Image: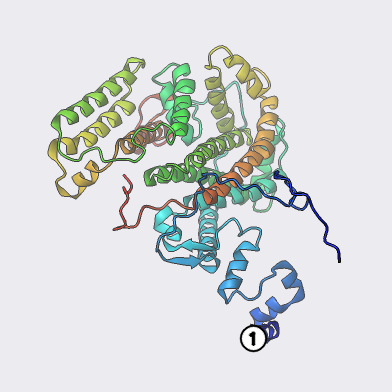
Amino acid sequence: MTTKQRTFTPAESEDARQIPVRVAEVQEDERFAVEDRDEPKVMSFPHLVLREAIALLGMSLFLVLLSLFADAPLEQIANPAMTPNPAKAPWYFLGLQELLHYYPPLVAGVLLPGLVVMALIQIPYFDVNLKREALWTAPRPGRATLVLLVAFAVAFLFNVAAHNTVWPIIIPTVVVGIIMALPGYLGAHGRLLSWLSSRSIPFYVFFWFLSVAVVLTVVGTLFRGPGWALTFPWREGIY
Amino acid sequence: MSETKETTLTAEREKRRGLMALLHGNRVFRSLFRHGLPDTNRNRALATFSNFFLHVQPVKVRLRAIKFTQTFYLGGLSLVCFGTLTITGILLMFYYHPSVPRAYEDMKDLQFVVSSGTFLRNLHRWSAHVMVALVFLHMVRVFFAGAYKPPREFNWVLGVILFVLTVLLSYTGYLLPWDQLAYWAVTVGANMAKAVPVMGEDIRFLMLGGTEVGENALIRFYVLHCVVLPLALTGVIALHLWRVRKDGGLHLPPLKGKGGEGDR
């Protein structure tokens, strides 16, 4: 039996059989493995799969029941000559359509939704208090007043660009500002205030965005009628 | 343990299991699922990672991560809606012609001629509304849990893209019945596109295939709704789920008493 003599050249090859030498380089690298804490684990099969099956069946049942008892709307055939009053988009766009009532289309239809999507995308990258440290560790009335002033300023700025008073933005903005400032004046007494004081600025900013979006959508969906005038669903019904 | 001893053990065990064991011993069944009865941890592990559909998930999960109140299963339930929408959508396509006035007549046929046509359309419509709501709630839940933080930044971005795609799918589908509701909702949206500076008119023209909502717009929305956007959504969902695993699994708040900043 003859052994084949090979020449060893220190090189890196993708085919280890060709050049049987591997050059190892220790490189710092990060992998995000599941942080392995001493916490109870179970086998995915059957524990997770079973839960998924139940969720699938439950959701399907819900959708089937909904479809059995509620019919999808179908109106007359499309008629470009007859504009319904009000002409409403699907509910998830009614927040935007409500904005159209206050701002020129450039602001309501392009600028604001574009900014919202951009703001959502940059959340994890724009390193403002990513650790989400508590806003209040002690009562600080001076800072609380500043928070209130900023809230009023934001509400004012939103109103300046509008040709109608933007109550659906002003009210949630001011309310969130007050909620945010409250623990700064009163301190963390009681469960609610201590919970509020331990929230971070990103929490409040998102909470504000959420409040404005919900108020706009609800107003646009339930409280707007012909000519986009204010209506009340319990009096005039939903348009 | 020698191989023969293991085979006799397995054989004995399977003898005791009755019908399920019979199934798992069947040659055809074994060609589909290569593992034996999932009554050992090894076979349970194989049930997960030797299955094309289940291998997306880890073999073992933290008990906290699969608790309903941890996530409310919002992402998974959105996926259920998407599945329902795909199936009902394909069935609806069998009855639908994207032309004027045929599209509207097809709606009437679904209502009065097709067996369970109304139910089919209802299921598609309501699943769409529920999906938009669930995807949004999923995003809110993820934000308040702080699950967007590094290393999950990019998966958050994918999530935002998925939300936008969901809304676009819903919006393009809204035109297809070609009734007053559809026509004017899309007109409102198309007029918003006109407000884009400089190229607003061009964007609107590209969107509608003309200067107003007509048959050209219908066929464009139909193709986007039935082909382009569902494919895009499927692709991004796959990426999104893959990233969940690669970024360290489901985000959970640190255990109590173990330090860490908690979630605010």
Residue B45, position as x, y percentages in the image = 58, 67
Pick the front one: A199 or B173: A199
Percent of width and height locating residue A118: 47, 28
Instruction: Name the residue at the top extreme.
Output: B198
Locate the C terminus of chain A by quadrant: top left
Q: Say whether residue B141 is left or right of residue B52.
A: left
Relative to B80, residue A135 above or below: above
Q: Can residue B58 be spotted in the picture?
A: yes
| Image quarter of the N terminus of chain A | bottom right
Q: Determine whether, in the image, residue A20 is placed left or right of residue A236.
A: right
Q: Does the image show residue B81?
A: no
Q: Which residue occupies the foreground of this view, A222 or A108?
A: A108
Q: Residue at x 64, y 19 (%)?
A: B205
Could you say where residue B197 lies in the image, as x and y percent from the top left?
53, 13
Residue at 65% across / 31% down in the picture? B221
Using the rendered view, name the quadrant where residue B23 is placed. Answer: bottom right
Identify the residue position indicated by label 1 in the image: B9
Tell which of B34 and B126 is nearer to you. Answer: B34
